[in-house]
Amino acid sequence: MTKSLHILNRLSFGVRPGDIEQIQSMGIEAYIQSQLSPDSIPEPPQITRQLNQWRTLKLTPVQLLRQYKPRRQKQRSEEERQQARQKAKQPLQQAIQARLLRAIASPRQLQEVMVNFWFNHFNVFARKEDIKFWVGAYEQQAIRPYALGRFRDLLAATVHHPAMLVYLDNWRNTAPNSPGAKGRFRGINENYARELMELHTLGVDGGYSQDDVIALAYMLTGWGLDLDENKGDSNGFYFDINRHDYSDKLFLGQRIKGSGVAEVEQAIDSLASHPATARYISYKLAQYFVADDPPSGLVKRLAKEFLQTEGDIRAVLDTLFQRPEFWQVNEYGRKFKTPYDYIISAVRATGTKEPNLKRISGTLNQLSMPLYNCSTPEGYKNIQEAWLSPDTMLRRVSLATAIAQGRLGDNQSVDASQLLNTLGDSISAQTKMEIENSPEKLRAALILGSPDMMYR
């Protein structure tokens, strides 16, 4: 496999027709730098037009709830109730279609890779309470703007977002003896504080204690929602002074004065700049871009860059892409694709101009990776152990036939010779020989279902 293919397999969701020629023309380093600066890459007008048609992507969580959540009105007819139920599905459907369209067709591929990476890192579950109305807004407002920015800003955006506050139950988190401790707001909920440290920042071995979890949970008291009374911000975030614990806290060895919202901002500062966070985030990035078990020396170098640049994600990735560990030839084509990676890469390889986004979403459901529907807070894993099984391979081979027949695109059968030309050296000599000895009508499916297509 060539360096050009390797960089496309790791910085993008796989090669499209013309990609290899583009990299060869501009050079690998220029390609990397352009991907690290997505605003420098023009978005095709057809993508912009399509995104503009999905109006829910432009709405705040408050607007989404007011406009799309069905209201209980007994006087409504059955037809009106059915229309309301169908309308309520639109925010999630449009969020899914927008994500898939960008992943397949946007030339800003590294940005799309990082949006997927960070959404899994800061996962929320669409089927919990009202989150189905908000996942698109969460991605648009809390993930996408910061995917290549500073980790501290990304972290803060997720901490404030209603989707996260509802998913990990912090919207009910209340100081037990506060004036607001009544009804459903009766006490401390440690869920979010624990996951914020274990999964989002320090990692399970990050050196924090149960006392730190409790201290952070008390700092997060009163952080909740106001979606009806216009007390909160445009997203619906609201700090309730009557449910907050105003005592001083000891957190990660630091005394934090009881002061309301500022307490959590201080905690975010501490977590975002902590060496354990630098190690944990660096490990996850190296695991995604290099190997399931990344070299410890690489992780240390990335963690150093993370701390020196105050969590500049772009700088950390730039360092990663320059490291010899990233360019180890024996790691080329060794990362097993998740179902999401596989489907997107296969559709991209066909070069279809009209991806059938609804069917593609359905295939992700069939492969046990429905978009926005991972119920556990750690999100979907990106390692081989989580996805490789005989059943997985059988399902992918079956889907390869559907893709080759154009059923996930424009219903035009895929030309096998063009597909081979697009994929280049990512298809092994052995696979090419097997394809040449097969009936022509089966060749595209055999390429898309080959072992070579399962890895990146």
Image (spheres, grey):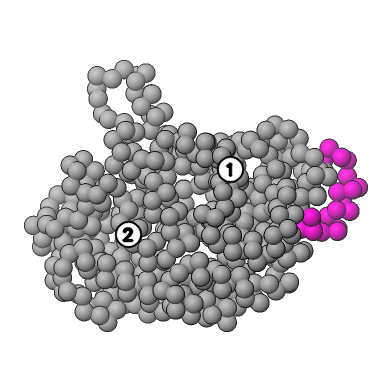
- Above or below, comparing residue 16 to residue 326 in the picture: above
Q: Is residue 251 magenta?
A: no
Give amino acid for label 1.
Pro
- Above or below, comparing residue 391 to residue 26 in the picture: above
Q: Which picture quadrant has residue 199? A: bottom left
Tag shown at residue 44: 1
Is tag 1's residue or tag 2's residue first in the polypeptide sequence?
1
- In the rendered image, is residue 103 in sight? no
Residue with the mark numbered 2: 159
Disc 1 and disc 2 in contact, CB within 8 angstroms: no
- Give the secondary structure at mark 2: helix
Who's the residue at 35% across and 72% down the image? Answer: 271
Q: Which picture quadrant has residue 194? A: bottom left
Range shown magenta: 424-442
Counting from the top left corner in percent of width and height, residue 254 is at 25, 80
Q: Residues within 10 Å of mark 2 (few under 14, many from 20)?
A: many
Quadrant placement of the N terminus? bottom right
Q: Is residue 437 magenta?
A: yes
- Above or below, comparing residue 16 to residue 332 in the picture: above
Q: CA distance from mark 1 to mark 2?
A: 33 Å
Counting from the top left corner in percent of width and height, residue 156 is at 34, 62
Give amino acid for label 2.
Val
- In the rendered image, is residue 226 in sight? yes
- Of residues 368 and 200, the one drawn nearer to the viewer in this rendering: 200
Counting from the top left corner in percent of width and height, residue 47 is at 55, 40
Quadrant placement of the C terminus? bottom right
Who's the residue at 80% across and 44% down the image? Answer: 418
